[in-house]
Image (cartoon, grey):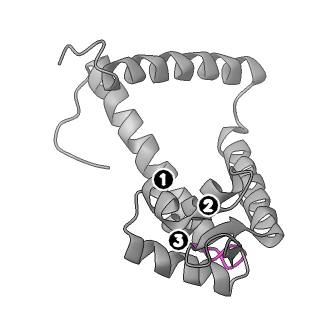
Amino acid sequence: MGGGSLSTDPFDRIERATLQLGWLGQRQFLQLLSDERFDLTIPQFYTLLHLSHRADECKMSDLARATQQSAASLTGVVDRLLEKRLVARVRPEGDRRQVMVTVTEDGRVLLAKIAEARRLAMRAALEHLAVDEINALLKLLDMLIGGMQRTVDGRDLRG
């Protein structure tokens, strides 16, 4: 992520670093999901992930809202997940017009494999750091996330 002259101001450097981390993380995640082992899009992944966190099936309308997708887009996403046998459609006995969706065991297994691949990628990215450096990084990241969360929540806007 290039640009003109680079500032030496530490706050500018931290902002650039967080933007670059976000960009690289997203790029790495897209590459991982598109790998032939997983073959998922971001909307498919988040739909599957949301369903995996539910104890029971989910209404399509609730799923669209939770994953911030239009009903039409979600229908296509769910259709592709159905083809891959990662989700199942269910119609409740009381209201056969209602369409519910649930994650299958294959879907749960795939999510576990994705999580493991992400862990391995992070380990590879940080393998050059000593344990005390990793602990220091975690502490600083927690502090950064807390500060950013306060600005998002509107409690500490100074800019």
User: Looking at the rendered structure, which numbered label has been put on residue 66?
Assistant: 1
Front disc: 2 or 1:
2
Q: Earlier in the sequence, mark 3 or mark 1?
A: 3
Q: Which of 70 and 112 is in front in this view?
A: 70
Q: Residues within 10 Å of mark 1 (few under 14, many from 20)?
A: few
Q: Nearer the viewer, residue 25 or 4?
A: 25
User: What residue did someone put label 2 on?
Assistant: 58
Looking at the rendered structure, the kind of residue marked 3 is Thr
Q: Distance between the residues labelled 2 and 1?
A: 10 Å
Kind of element beneath mark 1:
helix
Q: In this view, does 73 lie above or below 23?
A: below
Q: Which of 26 and 74 is in front in this view?
A: 74
Residue 1 in percent (x, y) is at: 32, 49
User: What residue did someone put label 3 on?
Assistant: 41
Q: Quadrant of the C terminus?
A: top left
Residue 14 in percent (x, y) is at: 36, 26
Q: Is residue 138 above or below residue 32?
A: above
Q: Give the range drawn in magenta.
A: 35-40
Q: Residue at horizontal 46%, vertical 42%?
A: 21
Q: Residues within 10 Å of mark 3 (few under 14, many from 20)?
A: some
Q: Residue at horizontal 71%, vertical 60%?
A: 114
Q: Nearer the viewer, residue 135 or 66?
A: 66
Q: Distance between the residues labelled 3 and 2?
A: 20 Å
> Magenta segment: does it hold 37?
yes
Looking at the rendered structure, the kind of residue marked 1 is Ala
Number of marks in the image?
3
Q: Residue at horizontal 39%, vertical 77%?
A: 72
Contact between labelled residues 1 and 2, with CB atoms less than 8 Å apart? yes
Q: Earlier in the sequence, mark 2 or mark 1?
A: 2
Kind of element beneath mark 3:
loop
User: Looking at the rendered structure, which numbered label has been put on residue 148?
Assistant: none
